[in-house]
């Protein structure tokens, strides 16, 4: 009986293949993502400017033209200033608000909806609100300055102030995302570590720096990545508040893409800007995965 049991082959179980079930998802992904991306790359390698030469293959000539014009580096630099400036300010505001809500839970039921309200307001309404606030004649910003004896300021006519106004307006709208994510992350930090730090006599700022921030670091990294992608590709407020001005001081890559395609009918140049924008976003995503692997180790 033992010999028969040993010599008998175990019955093979045929496992159903999974690829037929995944095929519709891959087809949808190819149609909705890969095809537009591939067509955009194809467009950047050809002429498309409403001319008789449309469709002519030019290789990297569009990229060389963008570099030769000298506007690319400036546009990319302004985009990074807008993006990183917004992220830093959003992090500071989001962390301060989340810590306040965590430390004073009684008022959080009233304050939390108010803090999250700007996030759900349409960008058009946000633009109208900030245009009213920054109005040089009767805006709230200049009205406040008048109370301390400072004359009216042309907020959107000065290159530095216009970029600062964009960053502040974007932070006002988007800080709620950071508040939500940081608040959720703070709830995952073990209370024992906080209590141990208090017993050791640590002040609240030291608890935040040495206990809370390290505890929510994975949340901060993920939040920063998504916020970077969204802000880097943000178009609405630039168009509504400054229209890229003054003198292209707030022209970002998304605005340059719109300007090249819909204003100047340079679809090939717009596609070139789009490919470069995807590359920068890809670098940010690659950096995120590198940091994530380091966190796992």
Image (spheres, helix red, strand yellow):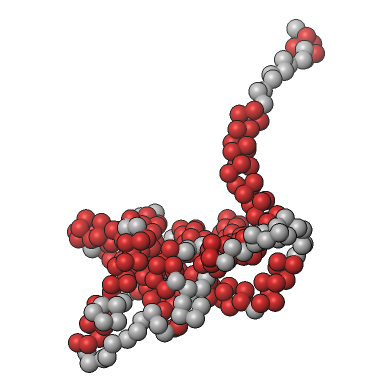
Residue appearing at x 57%, y 66% in the figure: 264
Front one among 92 and 226: 226
Q: Residue furthest top?
A: 1
Front one among 89 and 158: 158
Residue appearing at x 28%, y 58% in the figure: 117
- The vertical placement of 91 against 36, above or below, is below
* Image x and y of residue 75, in percent: 57, 74
Q: Residue furthest front?
A: 52
Q: Is residue 267 visible?
A: yes
- The vertical placement of 112 against 16, above or below, is below
Quarter occupied by residue 104? bottom left
238 on left or right of 294: left
Residue appearing at x 44%, y 71% in the figure: 243
Quarter occupied by residue 269? bottom right
Which quarter shows the C terminus?
bottom right
* Image x and y of residue 133, in percent: 28, 74
Which quarter shows the N terminus?
top right
* Image x and y of residue 98, in percent: 32, 63
67 on left or right of 117: right
Q: Is residue 277 visible?
A: no
Residue appearing at x 72%, y 71% in the figure: 64
Q: How many marks?
A: 0
Quarter occupied by residue 284? bottom right
């Amino acid at each position: 009986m033992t010999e028969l049991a040993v010599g008998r082959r175990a019955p093979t179980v045929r496992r159903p293949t999974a690829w037929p079930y995944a095929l519709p998802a891959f087809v949808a992904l190819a149609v909705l993502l890969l095809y537009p991306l591939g067509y955009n790359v194809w467009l950047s390698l050809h002429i498309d400017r409403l001319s008789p030469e449309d469709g002519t293959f030019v290789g990297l000539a569009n990229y060389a033209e963008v570099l030769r014009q000298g506007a690319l580096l400036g546009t990319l630099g302004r985009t990074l200033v807008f993006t990183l400036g917004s992220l830093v300010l959003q992090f500071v505001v989001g962390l301060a608000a989340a810590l306040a809500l965590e430390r004073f839970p009684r008022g959080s039921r009233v304050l939390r909806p108010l803090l999250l309200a700007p996030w759900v307001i349409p960008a058009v309404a946000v633009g109208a609100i900030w245009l009213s606030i920054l109005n040089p004649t009767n805006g709230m910003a200049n009205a406040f300055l008048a109370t301390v004896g400072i004359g009216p300021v042309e907020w959107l006519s000065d290159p530095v102030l216009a970029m600062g106004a964009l960053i502040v307006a974007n932070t006002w709208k988007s800080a709620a995302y950071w508040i939500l994510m940081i608040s959720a992350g703070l709830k995952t930090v073990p209370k024992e570590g906080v209590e141990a730090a208090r017993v050791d006599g640590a002040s609240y700022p030291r608890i935040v720096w040495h206990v809370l921030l390290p505890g929510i670091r994975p949340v901060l990294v993920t939040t920063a990545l998504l916020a970077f992608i969204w802000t880097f590709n943000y178009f609405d407020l630039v168009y509504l508040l400054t229209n890229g001005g003054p003198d292209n001081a707030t022209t970002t890559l998304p605005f340059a893409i719109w300007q090249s395609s819909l204003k100047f009918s340079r679809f090939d140049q717009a596609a070139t800007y789009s490919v470069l924008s995807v590359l920068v976003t890809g670098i940010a995503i690659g950096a995120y995965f590198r940091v994530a692997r380091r966190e796992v180790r």
